[in-house]
Image (spheres, helix red, strand yellow):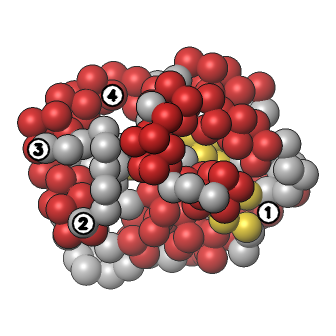
Amino acid sequence: KIGETKSYETLPGARLLLQQRLMMQEQIIIVGFMGSGKTTVACSVGRKLNCAVIDLDDFITGSEGRSPAEIIEQNGENSFREIETRMLAQVLTQNSAIVIAAGGGVWTIGENRLLIAKHEALTIWLDAPFELCWNRIQLKRERRPLAPSMEVAERLYRERQPIYELAEMRIPLAETDSAEEIAIRVVEGLATNR
């Protein structure tokens, strides 16, 4: 029915499949451009699967005592990417099923993709239109050294799109989608993927 929200519990065998995946301790990595809603959706997915959620940018901030923006501004993007890869490796080696909200550039680095593949983590791309991402970036008013203007951000968005397409699952987003609706689509995809 139109407007009816489908719960993942209603899918035949979905709960069993999800439990099996979690028992195998498979990690789920949410990727996508800045402002696509990775952290919000990851938290909602984590609640539905009753598993831990880690925001990689927050993990880096807690470990380094500086935000990703501060590291990029003070030491450059290359230095930040090295830290990011090291922190990603640390998170992936944890022995628990977990949902990881990755920073916008994590999946664009070949070394990170190899690391994720080595740990057999499932990658899910939140494919949000640029306009939606940019509106959210502006609303949050956070410092974004890699997106100082709409033109620079859009160029980066276009450059990253073909790499995001390498993710195992794609969840197309619309402006009207709530985090809850997206999380349900993610969980339904998890139940039927692989």
Q: What is the distance, in whole Å, between disc 4 and disc 1 at their CAs?
A: 33 Å
Q: Position of residue 39 (x, y in %)?
A: 49, 63
* SS assignment at label 2: loop
Q: Residues within 10 Å of mark 1 (few under 14, many from 20)?
A: few
User: Along the line of sight, which residue is nearer the eye, 70 or 19?
Assistant: 70
**Which element is circle 4 on?**
helix
First of labels 2, 1 by sequence position? 1
- Above or below, 11 relative to 81: below
Give the residue pinned by disc 3. Answer: 150
Q: Which residue is mark 1?
A: 19
Q: Nearer the viewer, mark 2 or mark 1?
A: 2
Q: State which mark lies toward you, 4 or 1.
A: 4
* Front-lying residue, 86 or 189: 86
Camera-nearest label, 3 or 1? 3
**Tag in front: 2 or 4:** 2
Q: Distance of mark 3 from mark 1, alpha carbons? A: 42 Å
Q: Is residue 31 visible?
A: no
Disc 2 residue type (three-letter): Arg
Going by the numbered disc 1, the residue's amino acid type is Gln
Circles 3 and 2: CB atoms closer than 8 Å: no
Residue at 27% x, 68% y: name it: 140
Dot 3 amino acid type: Met
Residue 141's tag is 2
